[in-house]
Image (cartoon, rainbow, N blue to C red):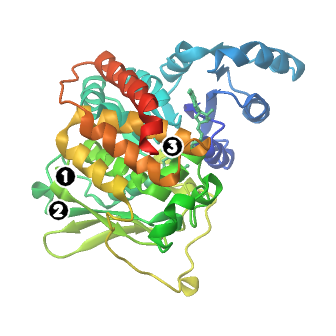
Amino acid sequence: MQNITILGATGSIGQSTLDVIALHPDKFNVVALTAHSNIDKLIEQAKTCQPEFLVISDQANYLQTKQKLARAKLSCELLTGHQGLCHVAQLESVDSVMAAIVGAAGLLPTLSAVKAGKKVMLANKESLVMCGDIFIQEVNKSGAQLLPIDSEHNAIFQCLPQSFEYGDLAASGIAKILLTGSGGPFLTRPLDSFDKITPDQACAHPNWDMGRKISVDSATMMNKGLEFIEAKWLFGLACEDIQIVLHPQSIIHSMVQYVDGSVLAQMGNPDMRTPIAHCLSFPERIDSGVKPLDFSALTDFSFELADFNRYPNLRTAIEACKAGQYATTTLNAVNEISVEAFLSGRIRFTDIARLNRRIVEQSEACALNSVDDVIALDQQVRKLALQQLDKACA
Ligand code: NAD
Ligand code: MG
């Protein structure tokens, strides 16, 4: 029996994880669930899987959650705040942790699981973007097992040889990592109408059903930029090793190209339950509930290169990746501010990339030697980005 903590249980990835777990009650036991503010969903989930711990991370929701738990006659221990999240990520009784909190808020709880040497199923790509170097050092120190949930990185992981050594592509005869992306909902929309894009349009992804932050990131292709940086850290790649390929149908989830001309691709319907099931049961395979791919129904199967004019965030992200950790920490922080400002109607869609670029260009190279340094820079950038929000729209 695998004992599991799900960080961010009420989100899109958290819910899909519970869906896969529900298919295999003999294999998985949920020890802890966490949510930030969706009390009702958390309680509903707790009724089904009866975890020992619940965390409602927004402390303002603690009392109300406690009352609702009592009313539902649930005996789970209720924790709150950032300490509560870190606590359930490193419990002795827990074997594996699904890291599915969105954004920088996921960094410390995910690191807590890493430091405790857990099997960490990483959906929270932002923690590698903010803190990749230190994060990987901690993985190596603790012996944690890091498994990628992000569908592209999960695909790459599946296409790499078992003997792959971190960072050593040549030894495995690998020429390139081909990171695929759909291009999002605005692949063919006329560029001169981009400033009219609304939050609901940006969140309506043609292939994937996701949380709102990652949906906007997919529409601007910042998501692919963050994934470029994530791939660098997960597999120890140089920026030159990674090529982004647009594949609008999202059937291939990424590929590995070998020096002999072979290209291995991982395919499947676009449904996060596949990489989730893969990580939950690795190295075995289990049913995920995902419909098998029906080749008779595939009409289009196409590829193209990404256009930086359409996706300026992608250029900024790749340049930040080349510049180093301070630049990607900066990028992540400003992007969280600009996406939130767009979702709440303060700035236009096109302002997101403008503000991101402006703040990354202003950032000065500095060494980040500790997680505290990373968090200090993250906070400083958020403040600066908020100050410049209005200028970005001018
Ligand atoms: P979501 O918005 O649907 O859910 C986010 C979860 O994080 C919720 O449970 C929420 O309660 C929690 N949360 C939000 N703010 C928090 C805070 N300040 N402190 C603690 N918890 C907080 O997001 P999602 O789409 O499930 O994405 C989660 C992560 O997985 C993101 O990092 C995203 O990039 C990554 N990811 C998602 C998908 C996808 O298909 N949804 C695919 C690949 C990677
Ligand atoms: Mg992805």
Along the viewing direction, whichever of 383 and 263 lies nearer the viewer: 383
Quadrant where the C terminus sits is top left
Q: Secondary structure at mark 2?
A: strand
Q: Secondary structure at mark 1?
A: helix
Q: Position of residue 79 (x, y in %)?
A: 64, 14
Q: Position of residue 362 (x, y in %)?
A: 26, 35
Along the viewing direction, whichever of 293 and 80 lies nearer the viewer: 80
Along the viewing direction, whichever of 50 and 336 lies nearer the viewer: 336
Are the residues tagged 1 and 3 within 8 Å (C-beta)? no
Q: Residue at x 63, y 15 (%)?
A: 80
Point out the residue furthest to the right here. Answer: 71
Residue located beneath label 3 in the image: 339
Q: Position of residue 166 (x, y in %)?
A: 20, 44
Res 293 seen here: yes
Residue located beneath label 2 in the image: 174
Which three-letter amino acid code belongs to the residue tagged 1?
Answer: Cys
Which three-letter amino acid code belongs to the residue tagged 2?
Answer: Ile
Badge 2 or badge 1: first in the primary sequence: 2
Is label 2 or label 1 in front? 1
Q: Residues within 10 Å of mark 1 (few under 14, many from 20)?
A: some
Which three-letter amino acid code belongs to the residue tagged 3?
Answer: Val
Badge 2 or badge 3: first in the primary sequence: 2
Residue located beneath label 1 in the image: 239
Res 250 seen here: no
Q: Residues within 10 Å of mark 2 (few under 14, many from 20)?
A: many
As measured in the structure, the alpha-carbon distance from the residue carrying label 1 to the one carrying label 3 is 25 Å
Q: Quadrant of residue 261?
A: bottom left
As measured in the structure, the alpha-carbon distance from the residue carrying label 2 to the one carrying label 1 is 14 Å
Badge 1 or badge 3: first in the primary sequence: 1
76 versus 106 height, above or below: above
Q: Position of residue 254 (x, y in %)?
A: 36, 63
Along the viewing direction, whichever of 261 and 301 lies nearer the viewer: 301
